[in-house]
Image: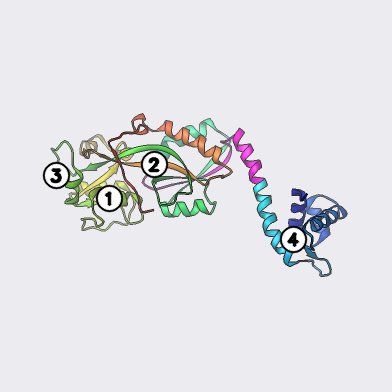
């Protein structure tokens, strides 16, 4: 069968304009040229694709079915061209990047300036959203890639590992355990832990660490910021848990209130996800290398004593 991409493109234009002359003009060819290619396509498919007796012309039942496949084929061909372009120049054009809120404030400022400096022809659109929302947008091709805590339930994504960061406890001044060198996960279960609201994967990970599915808290928080948790802890309303990169943003006084958690050290695994076969995978792979270089080397190393926390996604 000798069906060509040109024939499919002409047919798609004819379906859109419902007129041979206007379709030909949109394709930059003469009407006889377009008509001849449509006729050849019909001969290959052994059936009429359009009803020429109606004005404007209408697609036949066969034509309706062929149009669906034609559009997919044309889109795939366009994706092939984009893949080639991004393979040679992977960091050009626009990158639509999603990031979970518990990562974005601490990671994006680390890699964004260097990324834009090194690649002046790249523009980045960054969107903060929960894991569930980002997964939906990836599947809908509304994002090119997303930075998430993994593993997640969905397994059909390509994943580029970025780093692993430990979770540590932040205690208010004068807390009974302030003089301890570290805390155990068992001790956390009996403590009042200030947590992010439902929907944040970090909340799920914190509850998993504490060995419970219900937090021991008297205040319900609907604000998804670690700074709020730290301020409430400073007021003596409980302790909280923070990831390593968030701790690096604390003042020197507050950093003294941080306590590590005993081994196996609880860590969350941060990765860059994209759909397999996505036209911008070359860009995603290049971005992953830049992000990894922006975080402390200690977070890029694996440890057999780490306990990788999971999410409900």
Q: Quadrant of residue 121?
A: top right
Label 3 neighbourhood size at 10 Å, few (<14), some (14-19), many (20+)?
A: few
Looking at the image, is mark 1 or mark 4 earlier in the sequence? Answer: 4
Residue 103 location, quadrant: top left
Q: From which residue to which does the magenta span run?
A: 78-105
Residue closer to the observer: 51 or 244? 51
- Contact check, label 1 and label 3, Cβ < 8 Å: no
- Residue 198 visible to an observer of this rendering: yes
Judge depth for marks 1 and 3 and give the one in front.
1
Q: In the rendered structure, which disc, 1 or 3, sits on the residue that comes first in sequence?
A: 3
Mark 2 to mark 4: distance in Å?
46 Å
Residue at the image position 53 percent from the left and 45 percent from the top? 276
> How far is mark 4 from mark 3, CA to CA?
72 Å
Q: Residue furthest bottom?
A: 54
* Left-right relation of 118 to 49: left
Q: Secondary structure at mark 4?
A: helix
Q: Is residue 254 above or below residue 17?
A: above
Residue to which mark 3 is pinned:
175
Upstream in sequence: badge 4 or badge 3 = 4
Q: Which residue is mark 4?
A: 15
- Residue under label 2, please give it: 270
Q: Nearer the viewer, mark 1 or mark 4?
A: 1
């Amino acid at each position: 069968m000798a069906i060509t991409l040109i024939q499919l493109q002409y047919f798609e234009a004819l379906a859109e304009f419902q007129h041979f002359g206007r379709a030909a003009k949109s394709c930059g060819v003469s009407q006889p040229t377009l008509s001849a290619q449509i006729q050849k396509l019909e001969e290959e498919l052994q059936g009429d694709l359009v009803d020429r007796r109606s004005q404007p012309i209408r697609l036949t039942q066969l034509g309706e079915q062929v149009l669906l496949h034609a559009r997919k084929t044309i889109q795939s061909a366009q994706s092939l061209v984009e893949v080639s372009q991004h393979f040679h120049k992977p960091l050009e054009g626009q990158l639509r990047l999603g990031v979970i809120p518990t990562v974005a404030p601490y990671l994006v400022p680390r890699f964004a300036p260097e990324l834009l400096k090194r690649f002046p022809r790249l523009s980045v659109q960054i969107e903060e959203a929960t894991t569930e929302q980002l997964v939906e947008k990836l599947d809908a091709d509304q994002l090119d890639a997303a930075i998430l805590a993994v593993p997640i339930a969905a397994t059909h994504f390509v994943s580029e590992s970025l780093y692993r960061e430990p979770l540590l406890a932040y205690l208010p001044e004068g807390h009974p355990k302030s003089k301890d060198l570290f805390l155990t996960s068992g001790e956390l279960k009996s403590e009042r832990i200030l947590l992010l609201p439902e929907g944040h994967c970090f909340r799920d990970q914190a509850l998993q660490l504490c060995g419970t599915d219900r937090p021991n808290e008297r205040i319900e928080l609907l604000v998804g910021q670690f700074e709020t948790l730290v301020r409430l802890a400073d007021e003596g309303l409980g302790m909280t848990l923070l990831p390593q990169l968030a701790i690096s943003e604390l003042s020197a006084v507050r950093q003294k209130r941080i306590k590590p958690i005993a081994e196996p050290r609880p860590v969350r695994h941060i990765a860059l996800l994209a759909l397999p076969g996505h036209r911008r995978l070359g860009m995603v792979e290049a971005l992953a290398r830049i992000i990894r270089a922006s975080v402390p080397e200690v977070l890029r190393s694996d440890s057999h004593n780490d306990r990788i926390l999971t999410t409900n996604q």
